[in-house]
Each structure stands twice: as structure tokens, then as C-alpha cells.
Image (spheres, helix red, strand yellow):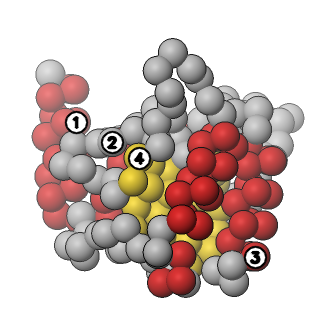
Amino acid sequence: MFDFIKKFFRKSSLRKHSSTIPTEILPLGKIHSYVAIIDAEESTFDECKTAIMNFFRAHDIKGCVFFQDFRKIGSEDRLITSIQTTITKKDLDWIGRPSRYKLNVLEEQAPDLFISLIKDPDFAIEYMARTSKARFKIGRRQMSGNLFDLVISDPAGKNISQLESFTAIKSYLTKIQ
């Protein structure tokens, strides 16, 4: 019963807050800002963050990397990413939406490009992607309603890292005219 209620409120929230801005595949020259979301629990996250920042800096595109970190962090553990751009379990409300503060940080970036490198996105990532006003959205797994304009999925039978996914995304971004 609780799952039914949660699903109802999730759908209602998405209907109410989803962006109405049309999305499309944009050439690199028309992208002025980006937001990328990566999984801080994956071993390549630091290299991936650096690769993302270096690629966009080389193309004079401003932006920000967000982290999803759902590990249980004890009192003696420390968060290894920026608290402003890290979404933890504590930042989610009862239906799974990120806090208003985190969504405002995302909105302030006013990205043209939204990239989710999360292999198995949950509702928090879906909510962020659907409410983002980005005009070009890239993900690793398509969601209902063709949320992403470009999907870089793992090849059949292979499990690739988010760094390898971003490397593939880079090659597509540089080819799109």
C-alpha cells in the first residue's frame, strides 16, 4: 500500500515539476554550460570527474559535476566530495526527490547539457533529469517518455565504467555538427 502511495506522489510531482522546454541533440558549439551527475561509489568516479571537467574546460564550457553518494557514512567517516554538489540519502524526501537546496544548486547552473552517468538511475536522478531545463540530455539508460536525447548504454554482455561511458559521450559530442 505504501509503495502505491509513493508511486502516486512521484507521478504527481513529475507532472507538476517536469520541464516543458523541448530538448534536442545540440552541437558542441551551441553548448555553453553543463551539469554531469556521477556515482561517487564507483571506483573511477574521481578520474571521471577530472575527465569531464577537462573536456568541457578545453571547449570553454562552464559547468558542474554532481555526485550521487548513497553509502552509509558513519560519524567518523568523511564525505569525499563537495557537500553542495553531493546528493546523499539524507538529501532525499520520502518519495525520493532531492532537497530543494540541491535542486536550486542544479538550477543555478542553467545547463544547456545534462549528463547522467548513473548506470541504474533511481527516482532522484529521474526527477533531476525531468525537471532540468537543459536543452540536451544524455543518459546511460533510457527512461519512459524518451527522457534522454542520447543514450550511451553498455554493450551487450559488458559492464563498462562511467569513465568509459563518458569517453564514448565525448566522441559523439565532438562529431555532432
Q: Which residue is mark 3?
A: 58
| Label 2 to label 3: alpha-carbon separation | 28 Å
Q: Which residue is mark 2?
A: 142
| Label 4 to label 2: alpha-carbon separation | 6 Å
Q: Which residue is mark 4?
A: 151
The residue mark sitting in front, 2 or 3, is 3
| Label 3 to label 1: alpha-carbon separation | 43 Å
The residue mark sitting in front, 2 or 1, is 2
Q: Is residue 22 left or right of residue 152?
A: left
- Closer to the chain start, of discs 2 and 1, is 1
Q: Are marks 4 and 2 in contact (CB under 8 Å)?
A: yes
Q: In the image, which disc is placed on residue 49? A: none
> Percent x, y for residue 173?
54, 64
The residue mark sitting in front, 3 or 1, is 3
- Amino acid at dot 2: Gln
The residue mark sitting in front, 4 or 1, is 4
